[in-house]
Image (cartoon, grey):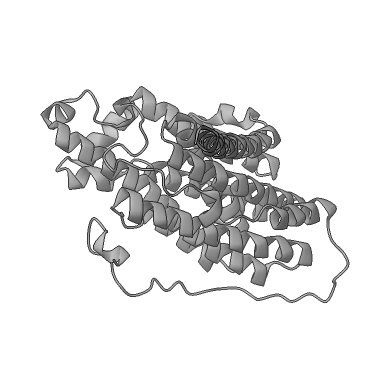
């Protein structure tokens, strides 16, 4: 079955062609490199994994309750629109909501794969080229995982959100080599990583928890890569050059904030998206979710040196300024530990099942 058969509305079957800008840079220095970036490159090689073997795709998924989270997570919960829905329609709304979330994940991951390849071309130093090459492989795996989950388990796909598409377009069409880092590694990946974490921690279903934990193990390295590369470079820029980057960050953060409202979902249920925007503003769950989505972006922006009063006012206006206090290294270590714990628990349970089967065979043989 073609993915186009699963889209909630028709999607152009031709490719989206984004004109590339800037230079492709070769370097003839093969020995010089930053130790921390090379350590990330080594980790990127060591941590490659096969989604066919590591993820238990035999786990069943109810498409009408994919994540097993409370219905309070839906913006219209407790309103007149919710009361009008039948139980069947509420199940369909859960399916649409999960499909929309994971569809944006897969579209964003394709953007990340293309951007990582672009960084390999454009970045001037070899250590960054090395790491970006491993990231391109990571992102290819993430596209594979999320697209399989959507097609085989959820059974529905949403088109790319226009706000995400706008940010991808701005990221890829800028001729300055650092802008793909800033747009993808800091903004798009940073928000995605936080969204993955929220869903990973609240879902009660094992398959989405596995997928998100393993993807996050990769993504934590990607955000760390962006921090290391940009922190060094931005120390060299003039005030005017830094201001240009800050304007890009501010615009990108507003785009990211607006895209998480999922207006496309409500249109499919005959509800005015503007009315839902107001519900999102008044929903305690959605306020919490939106705040947590910036838990990786805000401290990263501060860490790389884009921390003017204007940036701080923007984050204060969005209600996420306190996120600047987050410890990114601690969050990254936590992401690693959670993925390793899921592995350990899963394979320990499988080992116990195999042992029980062997014991049963031995007991039957002894009884016979």
Is 308 on the left or on the right of 35, as rendered?
left
Does residue 105 lie above or below 70 as drawn? below
The picture places residue 332, in percent across and down from the top left corner, at 66, 38
Residue in front for this viewpoint, 163 or 354: 354
Q: Residue furthest front?
A: 368
Residue 316 lies, with reference to residue 271, above or below; the image says above
Q: Residue at x 70, y 44 (%)?
A: 305
Residue 143 place in picture, x, y as percent: 47, 58
Answer yes or no: is residue 191 visible: no
Q: The N terminus lies in which quarter of the figure? A: bottom left
**Residue 235 to residue 170: above or below:** above
Q: Nearer the viewer, residue 183 or 270?
A: 270
Residue 150 x/y as whole percent: 36, 52
Q: Nearer the viewer, residue 334 or 271?
A: 334
At a point 25% along the width and 35% down the height, the residue shown is 276
Measuring from the top left, give residue 354's x and y in whole percent.
55, 40
Image side of residue 297 versus residue 31, left or right: left
Left-right relation of 69 to 351: left
Seen from the viewer's position, the closer of residues 123 and 253 is: 123
On the image, which quarter does residue 323 sit in?
Answer: top right
| Quarter occupied by residue 98 | top left
Residue that appears at 65% across and 72% down: 121
- Would you say residue 14 is visible in this rendering? yes
- Marks counted in the figure total 0
């Amino acid at each position: 079955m073609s993915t186009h058969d699963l889209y909630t509305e028709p999607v152009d079957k031709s490719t989206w062609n984004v004109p590339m800008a800037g230079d492709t840079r070769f370097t003839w220095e093969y020995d010089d490199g930053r130790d921390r970036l090379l350590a990330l490159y080594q980790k990127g090689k060591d941590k490659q994994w096969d989604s066919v073997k590591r993820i238990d795709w035999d786990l069943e998924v109810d498409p009408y309750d994919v994540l097993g989270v409370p219905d309070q997570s839906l913006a219209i919960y407790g309103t007149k629109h919710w009361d009008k829905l039948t139980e069947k329609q509420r199940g369909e709304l859960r399916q649409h909501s999960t499909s929309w979330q994971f569809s944006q994940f897969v579209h964003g991951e394709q953007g990340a794969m293309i951007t990582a390849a672009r960084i390999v071309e454009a970045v001037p130093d070899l250590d960054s080229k090395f790491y970006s090459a491993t990231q391109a492989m990571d992102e290819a795996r993430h596209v594979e995982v999320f697209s399989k989950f959507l097609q085989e388990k959820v059974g529905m796909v949403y088109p790319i959100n226009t706000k995400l598409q706008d940010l991808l377009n701005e990221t890829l069409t800028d001729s300055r080599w650092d802008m793909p880092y800033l747009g993808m590694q800091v903004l798009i990946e940073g928000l995605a990583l936080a969204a993955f974490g929220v869903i990973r921690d609240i879902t009660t279903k094992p398959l989405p928890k596995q997928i998100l934990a393993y993807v996050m193990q990769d993504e934590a390295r990607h955000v760390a890569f962006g921090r290391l590369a940009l922190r060094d470079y931005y120390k060299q820029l003039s005030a005017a050059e830094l201001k240009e980057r800050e304007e890009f960050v501010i615009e990108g953060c507003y785009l990211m904030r607006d895209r998480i409202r999922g207006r496309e979902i409500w249109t499919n249920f005959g509800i005015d998206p503007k009315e839902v925007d107001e519900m999102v503003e008044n929903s305690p769950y959605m306020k919490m979710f939106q705040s947590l989505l910036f838990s990786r972006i805000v401290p990263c922006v501060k860490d790389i040196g884009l921390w003017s009063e204007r940036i701080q006012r923007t984050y204060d206006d969005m209600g996420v300024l306190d996120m600047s206090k987050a410890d990114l290294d601690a969050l990254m270590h936590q992401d690693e530990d959670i993925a390793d714990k899921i592995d350990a628990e899963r394979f320990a349970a499988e080992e116990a099942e195999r042992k029980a089967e062997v014991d049963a065979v031995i007991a039957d043989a002894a009884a016979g």
